[in-house]
Image (cartoon, grey):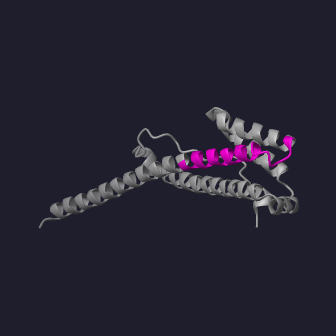
Amino acid sequence: MSTFVIWILVAGGVLLLLGIYLSWTAGRLDRLHARVDASRAVLDAELLRRSASALELATSNLLDPATSVVIADAASRARTVDEDGRHQAESDLTAVLGAALDEPEELAVWRDEEPELAEALGELGMACRRAAHARRFHNELVRGAQRLRRKLLVRWLRLAGHAPWPEPVELDDTVPRAFNG
């Protein structure tokens, strides 16, 4: 075999390996984008569940009227605000829940006296934790997709296609102290 044929075979092998790598990377990027979209839908569902639990607690007549009104207002805003103000409304709901439910000892006494309140607080606490976990999971997937999209070959060859740049969700989802422990 001549050296020319060997060089052609080597170049063909390198191009084949490069094509396989690029195809694998494009598929991986597509799967990451699908997972980011799915995690965003789960996060939205968990945030809606959290605001629904807060609204249910506020309308249950188990809390004092002032606290109920403040929680109901923040939960209603979080459920009805447009996409642009959603993160701020969710952060406001977190702040309201943190302020309204900042006395774990007092809530423990209420839980003992009112089984319905204990159940409502348990559901709200679970919804708060699930929303926080969903946001962290979503943001982790976003970071992975962004990391892959920053690679030189992915950018040069536009392997992401027309998919929008994945954005993390930044909001305060701190679980109120009353639900810790």
| Residue occupying image coordinates x 45% and y 41% | 163
| Residue occupying image coordinates x 40% and y 46% | 159
Taking 70 as reference, is 21 above or below it?
below
**Where residue 125 sits: x, y (%)?**
71, 57
Is residue 49 one of those drawn in magenta? yes
Query: What range is drawn magenta here?
Result: 42-65
Name the chief secondary structure element in magenta: helix
| Residue occupying image coordinates x 62% and y 44% | 48
Instruction: Locate residue 160 relative to residue 39 in the image: left or right.
Output: left
Q: Nearer the viewer, residue 10 or 165?
A: 165
* Quadrant, the N terminus: bottom left
Q: Quadrant of residue 65?
A: top right
Query: Does residue 88 appear anywhere in the picture?
Result: no
Q: Quadrant of residue 13?
A: bottom left
> How many numbered marks are there?
0
**Where residue 171 sits: x, y (%)?**
70, 46
| Residue occupying image coordinates x 58% and y 44% | 167
Taking 26 as reference, is 4 above or below it?
below
Q: Quadrant of residue 60?
A: top right
Instruction: Locate residue 1 relative to residue 41 in the image: left or right.
Output: left
Q: Nearer the viewer, residue 173 or 79?
A: 79
**Where residue 93 sits: x, y (%)?**
75, 44
Is residue 159 one of those drawn in magenta? no
**Where residue 152 sits: x, y (%)?**
46, 50
Q: Nearer the viewer, residue 136 or 14?
A: 136
Instruction: Locate residue 169 relative to residue 9 in the image: left or right.
Output: right
